[in-house]
Image (tube, helix red, strand yellow):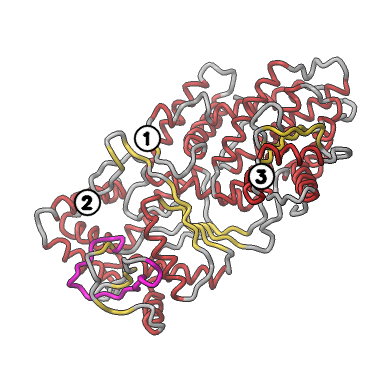
Amino acid sequence: MNGSDHYFILRCQSYIIKEFQKSGMDVQPAEIRAGGVPEADIAVPVFRRAKVLKKDAAALAESIVKHLELTASPFASARALKGYVNLKFNPEALAEGVFADYQRDPERYGAWTLGQGKTVVIDYSSPNIAKPFSVGHLRSTIIGQALYNIFSFLGYKVVGDNHLGDWGTQFGKLLCAFELWGDEKKLAQNPTGYLLELYVQFHEKAKMDKTLEAKAREWFRRLETGDPKTRTRWQEFVQLSRKEFDRIYQLLGVSFDLTLGESFYADRLPEVIERALKKNVARAERPPETVQSGEEDVSQNEKVVLIPLDSMGLKVPLLLQKSDGTSLYAARELATYEYRVQTYQPEKILYVVGNEQEFYFKQFNAALKLLGYDVPCIHVNFGLIRLPEGRLSTREGRVIFLLDVINEAIDRAKAVLVSRDLSQEEKETIARKVGIGAIKYADLSQNRVKDVVFDWDRMLSLDGDSAPYLLYAYTRTRSIFRKAPTSLPPPQPKLLTTPEELTLLKHIAWFPLVVRAAAETYQPHRVANHLYRLAQDFSTFYDRIPVLKADKNELVSTRLALVEMAGTVLKTGLKLLGIEVTERM
C-alpha cells in the first residue's frame, strides 16, 4: 500500500508530480490538496517555485496549465487561478478508480502498510493512582487511543502504555495523611474519592503546618527504600485505584498493551543515575536557582543530581535525584525510556501529555541527546479541559469526575431514544454507544492543542457537529440496505454523474490521505472533520437522489454500492476515533 498506484488519489498525485516535472517544477505531495473552490477538485499552489524563479505566481501557473497533458489522465480540465493550478476530475475516472480501490478490500479501505516492520510506543492516559478519574484525564485517554487506532491502521506495531503515576513525593503526602487522619471504613466505601479528600486535606493543613512537607518526604523515602508497612499500604492504594480505572476504561472502550506504572522502573533508577554520572552528563551539585522538579520545588540549598543543559541552549537543568537519595520524575522517565527502547526498538515514542509540559519535554529530549539516545520522543501536546472558573485542580478539590460525565451522557442519549420503536435492550445499547461517542467526538473533532472549556451542553450535545449526527448518517445507509432488493445487476460506476454522487466519491477518494495525514501530524481531528463533511454530503445525497427508486436496476445497484462505500468510510473513520456505530437509532 505504499505504491503510488494503490489509491486513486495517489495516482492523481503521481500524475501531477510527473507533469509538473516536465515543466521544470518540483512539487511535493503535501502541496497537492483538495480544491477550495467549485472549479477545483485538486489545487496545487506554485508560490514556492515562483519565488525561487523570481516569477509572478499567476503567470507561472498559467504556463504550467498550458503544458499539462490531460489525455488518459484522471482529470477532465485544468485552470490557473491566482497562483494555483486547479484540476477537475474526470467523473468516469473518479468513479471507476474509487470503486476499484474499495472493492480490493472493503473493510480495509483507507488502510496502509507504511508502518510495516516498524514499532511506535504511545504513552497515554496515565492517571495518578489514588485520585478519581476526572475529565482532566479524558483528553490524553481518547486522543491516545485514537492515535493507537490510526497508527495500527497504517500498518505499525503499536504498543500502548498506560504509564500510571504510582510513585513519587505525592505518595509520601498521601501515606502521611492516611497515617495521621485515615479511616479504614471510609477507604473501603469510596477508595479514590476518600483518598482525594485526604490529599486535599494534606495541602490545606500544610499551609499552616510547615513540618508536614518534611514528614511526607520521609514517607516517600520509606516507600522507595522498601519499608514493608509502607509498601503494603501503597499497594492497597494502587489496587483500589486500578480497579476503578479499569471500570472506566471498559466503559470508554479504551485498552492498553502495558499498564506498568512508574513503580515498575524503581529498581532501574540507581543504574540510570549512576550511568549518567559516569558519562559526565549528570553531576551532583546545588541547583543554580530554585527550580521545579515536576513534583515540588527543590531548594537552592539542597544538593541534587542534575543534568546541566546549557550546552543544549537551556538554562534550567533536569533534576534526577534529591539529596536524601529519593528519585525525581525525570529519573523515572529516563528509566522508562531505556526500557521501552531496549524492549521494543521503536521508531519513535509518543507522549500524549498536556501543553503545560512543553518545556519539560524540551529538557528531556535535550538530556537524551547528551546521553547518546536517538529514538525520538514526540510530545503530542493538548490543551487543558477547564471549568468556567479556571483550570481543574486536584489540590483544591475542583474536579468533575469522568464517571459522572459518562453516566450523564448515557442518560441524555436515553431521553432522546424514549419515543423510538426499539426494544429496551436496544435502547440501552444504543444509548451507551451514542452517549460515549458524543463525549469522544466533542473532544476529537477539535484541534488537540486548544484548551477546552468544560460545558455540559456542548460536550454532551446530541445534534449538530456531533457523534450522534454521524451515527445517524451511518444508520441511514443501513436502513437503505434493509429495504433493498436481493437480486440486482453488477454496479456500473460510470453511471454516477450527478453533483451529489460525485461529491460523495471525492470524500471517499480523499479518506486514505486524511488518515495518513492524521498520523503524520498526530491530529485525530482531521479524521473527525472529514467524516462530518462526508455525513453532511451524504444527507444531501439521501434527500435529493433516489436510490431504490432509480429508473434502472443498474443505477439502483450502482447507487447502492455508493451508499455502501459511504457507510463503510463512516464506520471505519468512527472506529479509528474509538466510536462504535449502531445499525439503528
Name the kind of residue labelled 1 in the image. Phe
Q: Within 10 Å of the Cα at label 3, are there few (<14), some (14-19), or many (20+) other Cα atoms? A: few
Look at the image and tell me in which quarter the C terminus lies.
top right
Question: Is residue 299 at least partly visible in the picture?
Answer: yes
User: In the image, is residue 373 part of the stretch drawn in magenta?
Assistant: no
Question: Is residue 516 at least partly visible in the picture?
Answer: no
| Of the image marks 3 and 1, the number of the one nearer the N terminus | 3
Q: Which residue is mark 2?
A: 198
Q: Quadrant of residue 167?
A: bottom left
Q: Toward the viewer: 69 or 359?
A: 69
User: In the image, is residue 301 part of the stretch drawn in magenta?
Assistant: yes
Q: Which residue is mark 1?
A: 454
Q: Which residue is mark 3?
A: 55
What span is colored magenta in the figure? 293-313
Circles 2 and 3: CB distance less than 8 Å?
A: no
In the figure, is residue 522 to the left or right of 241? Answer: right
Residue 338 lies, in percent from the top left, at: 48, 72
Q: Nearer the viewer, mark 2 or mark 3?
A: 3
Query: Residue at 30% of width from left, 75% of height from top?
Result: 305
Residue 520 lies, in percent from the top left, at: 59, 51
Q: Nearer the viewer, mark 3 or mark 1?
A: 3
Q: From mark 2 to mark 3, how far is it between C-alphas?
A: 69 Å
Name the kind of residue labelled 2 in the image. Leu
